[in-house]
Amino acid sequence: MSTWEQDRRLDERQKTSLLAKMRTSCAPAPRMAPEARYDVSFETLSAYREFDLQRAFGEALGLSNPFYRLHEERAGARSRIAGREVINFASYDYLGLNGRPEIEAAVADATRRWGTSVSASRVTAGERPFHKALEEEIAALYDTESALAFVGGHATAVSTISALMGPRDLILLDELSHNSLILGAQLSGATRRLFRHNDLSALEDQLAATRDRHSRALIVTEGLFSMDGDAPDLSRLIEIKRRWGCWLMMDEAHALGVMGATGRGSHEHFGVDPDGVDIWYGTLSKTLVSCGGYIAGRRALIDFLRFAAQGMVYTAGMTPQATEAARVAIGLMRDEPELVARLRDNSRLFGERANAAGLDIGSSQGFAVAPVVVGDSLRTVVLAERLLKRGINAFPIIPPAVPEQSARLRFFLSAQHSRDDIERTVATLAEELRRLDADGVSVASAARAFMGGG
């Protein structure tokens, strides 16, 4: 056999082998029922598996779950958990207005007159007089031309930012901004930049590097940060936004009722003209003891949002009860500035006693929000449980809500806390921290025990 024939037969054998492989690879897969092909179990979600591991970890250490604790009565400066009265520091009721007779009477009257719902979106179901009355009160707080009240606080920020900004625009946010602000920026499609917390020089550096590449620019920050209890320099923010041709949006969710001599928020505290801020955003669930959110600003902004904000157009309007509760709460805050003064005194007292006890309250500036930084997550959760057993309810904040090794207990002060409440709490807190140090509680040691490593 010639060499040529040998090569030809070899080529044919290779071709046959290749064709066989191709037929095998192209053959249809065996038919399987959909339930066998796809895993539709919620337990397979990675976040669920992580939560389940944390729950098992806590149970192995004999810790109760600190999340979604059941409060058995109205929660203010006092509450009842597991049948026991506790001093409560986990409520946003800064001025102690929840349950005030004036608010309860207004809510009852609104129920008799208007029922319990407006039935649909305000765009389709129409307006009600109580909506207008609340929005006029909100506009007066900020000396603005108009205001708009939304049924949900989180949705207020998300739908406002995503409606205003687009792909050609720039949004600059403080790195500790609330989730609602971050999500609104993401949904807008705009270029997003975070600047270091309360570092306005870093903000200016970012504007210098990026402003001229974009059409509109929006600076977003908070009047009072709920994790750290600190505030940015509003006067300088207004100067920066004017210099660089930006809109400025201030989240006043925790500043309203807390900052300023009469509780009107950061503009009153800093003594600036509120017209220097383009978008005042806040929620109705803290000082105003209701539920929902608001935007206050120029009439053109509010008219635009009435038809462009999805959180307004595609959801039902605020209920009569929530609207009237917030409206009357604004009146009480305005008429009783002594409540704001009492809250300020309580905040100052907590800070003084905590500092004297050697507790780390971070950058808190004495505006009702006082973190006590513990660092280790497990120590923080254990500390919260030990305090609860001694009649003090303070919520543990752990990563990812805060950076690693900065877990803390967060204390919300109220005008209704007594001096004894605060002094007893700080003394008990310091004592339990010393016990934790003596016990050597840490995530690392507990994790080794949990995993069977001794």
Image (tube, rainbow, N blue to C red):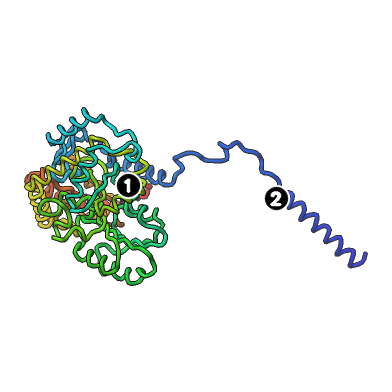
Mark 1 or 2: the one toward you: 1
Q: Which mark is residue 306?
A: 1
Q: Position of residue 409 (x, y in %)?
A: 22, 50
Q: CA distance from mark 1 to mark 2?
A: 58 Å
Q: Position of residue 219 (x, y in %)?
A: 29, 61
Q: Quadrant of residue 88?
A: top left
Mark 2, residues whose alpha carbon is within 10 Å: few (<14), some, or many (≥20)?
few
Left or right of 49 in this view: 252 = left
Q: Residue furthest right?
A: 1
Circle 1 — which element? Answer: helix
Check disc 2 and give the amino acid type: Ser
Report the residue marked by disc 2.
25
> Would residue 441 be seen by someone viewing this image from the given angle?
yes
Q: Which mark is residue 77?
A: none
Left or right of 142 in this view: 377 = right
Residue in front for this viewpoint, 415 or 53: 415
Mark 1, residues whose alpha carbon is within 10 Å: few (<14), some, or many (≥20)?
some
Check disc 1 and give the amino acid type: Arg
* Mark before the other along the chain sequence, 1 or 2: 2
